[in-house]
Every structure is written in structure tokens, then in C-alpha cells.
Amino acid sequence: MERAVVQVTLFGLLLVLASTLPNKDDWNIYSFHINSTVTSRYATTVITSRVANRMDDSKEIEFQVRIPKNAFISKFRMFIDGQWYNGVVKGKEKAQQQYTEAVSRGQSAGLVSSVGRTLEEFKTAVTVAAHKKVTFELTYEELLKRKLGKYELQIHARPMQPVKDFKVDVYINEKAGINFIDIKGGLSTNALANAITRTHADKQAWVYFYPTEDQQKTCDGCGEQGMNGDLVIVYDVNRDSSLGDIKSSAGYFVHHFAPSSLSRIPKNVVFVIDQSGSMSGRKMQQTRIALIHILNDLAEDDHFGLITFDSSIFHWKRELVQANKENLESAKTFALNINERGGEATDINAAVLEGARMLNAHPREGSASIVILLTDGDPTSGVTNLELIQSNVRRDIADKFPLYCLGFGHDVNFEFLEKMSLQNNGVARRIYEDSDADSQLKGFYDEVATPLLTDVTMIYNGGTNLTQTNFSQYYNGSEIVVAGQITDNDIETFTPQVVAISVRIVPHMTFSETNATVEYTGTDFDSHIQRVWAYLTVKQLLEKELLFSGPEKENVKKEALELSLKYSFVTPLTSMVVTKPLGENTDVLHKPKEGGTTQALPSPVGHRPLSRKGLKKRTRLQGHVVSYSPSRLADAERSGRVGV
């Protein structure tokens, strides 16, 4: 049977993919809806797929979607023969027995796997009786992150068959007011332009995408197998108040802080580049391209340094220099001549400490310092003990500037880089080995290229149970978000204030308003504001768990688990037990760690009808359980990709 795919992807801030087979003689997806509601930057997405089994015997129908890695699944259910079957979130240990039983039966018990840059894949299957229907409904939640001055909702639609009732509904509600909204992407042009309706009214916006079956076949890049392209919704909100946007409801508040009209702070940046043998070929070529673009963007009042390393350290210059024309031309020549060296040894400890030394030796009042490390491997030379490296780096940086770690490829020890970044007020980012890796590198740099504030402290008199309130730097186009509870729900005594260092005012500047208004949003937002607080709190507790050890680690883990269970979030500490009709096997859904799952071969995807009497083989591949038809399995065996 020809295999095809239904995919609808909400990428970046919202991302979903669904897959299916197109044989309408056997079955039919007669309705597929994605409904995304964004309220004060918090997105709740519901995917609903309705499928009919047209055959005279029972079929196994598989539901498969992809969601953002930063999202938490909060609900999944199936409607079969007049009854809802709901997934239940449990602590991972309590779900372990069901998980173990599923593995012993040879089932794919780990229902979520990492499948790319920003996606996790969820799938489950259920048997549908002849001429009956099933409804799948999945809900996930995510706090949207502002990057480069905008929030972006990207929808990738590739159904591979026309769907009669195919709808994407997006509703945006921003109390601060929507500054602009735009729609881009291949699906917004030519034949499909008429399928899009957009309405923008001050604080609200609606986008509807309802392509007909004919439109799904006639757009650019489309055909009998349906749509194949992107729909991108871009927006930002008004930022009239220097203190930002503060909402409260039912004793909880959320504060979005992104002041405008600030002068940029000159920066001191050191790039620490791995040039060991594993960086050979395309990785090194793309690194050189990205470095040239980054050097071109440095301002004349910036200072910078370049270090390359394998088992030894190589300097362009041993001290930071001003980004004037002469130095930039010299640095570009150096960057163009960076080549991988023959050895595989990598001395990450010495390289990062040298970057920290260069910044510590070059203090400049009124400037912001940054170290950016790019590596694709583990430390194999010099100090190789990971905890000792982290301790050394933390000692030398001493909270004076952030460390950003870019891990190139899938072989890098991402957890090591992530922990080292978090310990030093930075973040880790994976760079994927694709044709646009240079753009990924440049894109990350752009996010931190323009510091506007340093040493940002968010103060809330009358607030408690606060999320993170101290931030080393605030960058142009980004946003700081803090949530918490208002003591005794007394808004009258709740006073927010932000203290930070800027280029113009020394030692600090204060953002506050004498008559600051904390907007009470009313009952419609009661659950919303509280869930923003819960989402942020769980995310940050999971980061703390990575940093802590001993009793402190266990206390943080316990708190994160309790909140995950209370708000039904599927997190690394919880699992969702997917219940099914009597006689059906129970599935257990886990959330994978970044880099913790090796991608398997593409498995049969979509709402996949398989007769219970039909032949079906299951084989293990790189830690996954993958289901294959006999012909597909034979092809894989001949190619040597799997073993039985």
C-alpha cells in the first residue's frame, strides 16, 4: 500500500504534526482540526482528529502527532462507541509497572521520542470496529518565548491527501494590545491565499486557515497528495509602560518585562571554537561562514577575542581588542583559515578558562561581557572530569558574565554543556548538522548581540512563591517573564519594581511607576494566570534539579513532581497512562530528555490501519521499538539497517 503522511506542524512557539495514510477505500480522516489559543503569550493547543473505519473488519488506527519540546502535554483522550477514554498523569515511578509490562509484550511503551530540532513525537493506537469511528484529542501548553522582537507561530501543512474538513484556528488575546500581526509562508500565497482569513482588532486577532480539497491540490508544491508548505503567523504586543505588562487573577500574577527605547550596551565577547578532528568538513566550513557574518555585525565600541582549541589553545590575539575596521579585517582572515586539526583530543576546560581570563583581564565599566563556546565533543584532553571542569569554570566566571554553550551535532554531551551554561547564567543550544547550520549559529548570536541591561533584579513587595527574579542580562528583542503569588491576594500592598544597570545610568536604573496598575483579569483568566506560574515554576525546578545534588536535589525534584501532578503536566518526572477499551494494551507516555533519544528509521506513520489478522513484525532499533510491515522489514534487513 502506498504510504503517505498527514502533517500539520506548529513550529517555534507552536508546533504540531499529524500523519496518515491516504487509502480512502479503507478508512477516512473526515475531520482534522487544530485550535490554538494564545492568551498573554501562553498558548494552549488542542488537536482533534476524527477517523472512520470503512472496512468490514476491525482495524488498528494509529494517532501520531509532533509537539514542541518546550510544551507540556496536559490532556489526551479518545472517544470510541459513545465513551471517552482519558489519559491519566502519574508519577513516573508509579507508571513504571505498566511501562515494564508493555515492554515485556514487545510494545513501543515509550510513546514520546525526540525527532528533531524542536519536536517530540507522540503516538498511540487503538482498534476500531468495522464501520465505526474514533476521535483523538490531544492538548498541550506552552509559554511562548519572544525572540528578535516578535512571537512566531509557524504551521507546516503536509497532509499528503486532501482532507474534507481541515481547519486551523488561531486566536490571540493580548491585553497589552497587539502591535502588529503578519502572515507569511508559502501557504499564504497564490491558490491558498483565499483560504486565509485574518482579523485584528486592538487586543485580539483571529487567523483562520480553511483550504478546500481542491485548494489543497492546486497550491504551489501541492498535488493529488495534498498540501505541502508553511503558514507563518508573526506578531508582537504594545510596550507602552517601561515597567511592563502585569496581570493578576485569583491570587496569582504574571509580569512581562521588555522595555523599549533603551540604548545598547557595548559588549565584550570571546568566541571559543573547537577545531578538533571531529569538526572536519561541513561543520568547520559552516562555523567559518557564521563567524564572518558575526564579525561583520560587531559595533565599533564592542571588544572581542577569538580562541580555537583542540588539545592545545590557539589565539588570534591574547587580549581583547576593539572592533575597529583594521582588527575586524585581521579577525576575518584568521576565521577563514580556521581548519580542523588531525587529532580528536579536546581540552574544553583550558579553552573556556582562557576565554574567562581574557574577559576578566579586560573590565570595562558600562559594558556587558559574554563567552560563547562551540564544540561537538566531550572533553578528552587536560581536565576530563566533568564536575571538575564545571567547578573550575564557575570559579573563574564567578557570576560576572554568562556562558553560552553551543553543542554541534548529536554526539555532543549536551547535558554537560547545559549544566555548565546554567551554572553560569547562560543557556545551551544544540546546533543541528544541516545545510543551515551557519544560519543557526548566526541566529543564536543575534539573540544575544544587543545587550540593553545587565544585573536585572525583579522586586515584588507583597509577592511570594516567585519564579526566577534575577537575570544577568536583558537583550534587545527578548522578554523577561516572572510569575508568582500575591500575599493574601492583596493587590493594594503588591508593589512591583525592576532594578538594573544600563549604559546611561550608573550604578543602576529603576523601572517603577508611582501609580502602577496591576490589571485584574477576572474569572476568565483565573486558571490561565495560575497555569503560567505552574508552567514556569516546573520548568525552572527541573533546571535546578540538574544543578543540585543530595537532599537539595531530592527536595527540588519532589516539588516539581507535585506541581506536575497537580496541573497534569507530562514532564520528565511524570508519565501519562493512556487508557483504552477493555482488552486493549495500555500505553505509557514519557517525556524524553534533550539528546536522550536516538532517532530511529521512519516508522509506519499516521492513522495506520492494520488488520489484527495481518502479519506484523516488531523489531528493536537503537533503543526504540519500531513496527514494520513484512516488506518494509525485509528492505531494512537487506540494507543492513536493522537486525532481527
Image (cartoon, rainbow, N blue to C red):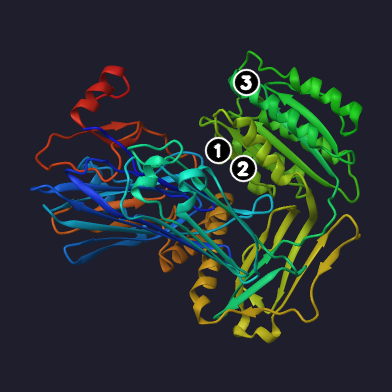
Could you tell me residue 427's position as x and y percent? 64, 46
> Are dots 1 and 2 in contact, CB under 8 Å?
yes
Question: Looking at the image, is mark 1 or mark 2 earlier in the sequence?
Answer: 1
Could you tell me residue 222's position as x and y percent? 40, 38
Q: Which mark is residue 345?
A: 3
Could you tell me residue 468's position as x and y percent? 65, 62
Count of picture labels? 3
Could you tell me residue 238's position as x and y percent? 69, 65
* Most foreground residue, 407 or 363: 407
Please name the residue shown 90% across and 45% down the image.
Answer: 364
Indicate the quadrant where residue 113 lies. top left
Q: Secondary structure at mark 1?
A: helix
- How far apart are the alpha carbons under marks 1 and 2? 8 Å
Question: Looking at the image, is mark 1 or mark 3 earlier in the sequence?
Answer: 3
Q: Which mark is residue 428?
A: 2
Determine which residue is flagged by label 1. 414
Residue 462 located left or right of residue 525: right
In the rendered view, tell whether residue 592 sits above or below residue 556.
above
Q: Secondary structure at mark 3?
A: loop
Question: Looking at the image, is mark 3 or mark 2 earlier in the sequence?
Answer: 3
